[in-house]
Amino acid sequence: MTKETRLPTPGEIKELVSFLPRLYAQGFNPIKKWEGGNKNAEGIIHMPWPVYDTLVEEFIRVASGEWWLDFDYHPEEAYEMLKNEEAIKSADLAKIKMMLTFIVRGERFSDGYWGSMIEGGYVRRLLERLEQLANE
C-alpha cells in the first residue's frame, strides 16, 4: 500500500514558483564547485560530488515537501514527460508532482543531477507550468 499525498495549496504552489526568477537569474550557477576526485593519503580516490548553491538546496527542500512528493511515481514515465515540452505544458498537478519527485530523487543516483535539471531548463518548464496553473 502506497502513501497518498494531498495536492499542494495555492500558497505552496506560489512558494515553489517563487524560485523561478532566482534559479534562472542571469549568471546563476546551481553548482558552486565540485569536491573530491583526489587521492587521499591511503591512495583512495573518492568520486567527485557537487557543492550546490544554497538556493538549490532550499529549492530541493521545498520541492521535497510531502505535498509535492508522489510516493507511487513511475520513474520511466516521469522521465519521458520531462523530455517532452508539450507534456509539461499540459501537465496537471499530479503529473508535476511525479516529475518533481523524479528530479528530487535523481541526485541519489547521479551526482550533479539537480544541477543538470536546472541548467537543462527542465525545472524552469515545470515552474512555468505551475505558474500557469496557479493563474487559472
Image (cartoon, rainbow, N blue to C red):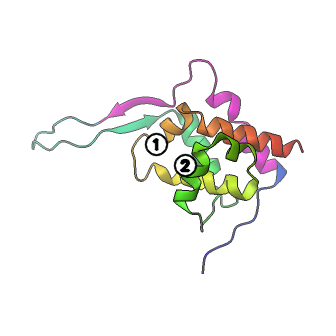
Amino acid type shown at disc 1: Tyr
- Marks 1 and 2 sit apart, C-alpha to C-alpha, by 8 Å
In the rendered image, residue 78, in percent from the top left (x then y), is placed at 58, 54
The residue lying toward the viewer, choosing from 1 and 42, is 1
**Mark 2 highlights which residue?**
103
**Is 105 placed left or right of 6 in the picture?**
left
**Mark 1 highlights which residue?**
113
Q: Based on the displayed image, in which of its 4 quarters is residue 38 positioned?
A: top left
Relative to 44, residue 124 above or below: above
Region of the chain picked out in magenta, as a range: 11-35
Earlier in the chain: of badge 1 and badge 2, it is 2
**Is 111 placed left or right of 92 in the picture?**
left
Question: Which residue is painted at 53% across and 31% down in the image?
Answer: 119
Mark 2: give few (<14), some (14-19) or many (20+) Cα within 10 Å.
Answer: many
Mark 1: give few (<14), some (14-19) or many (20+) Cα within 10 Å.
Answer: some
Q: Residue furthest left?
A: 42
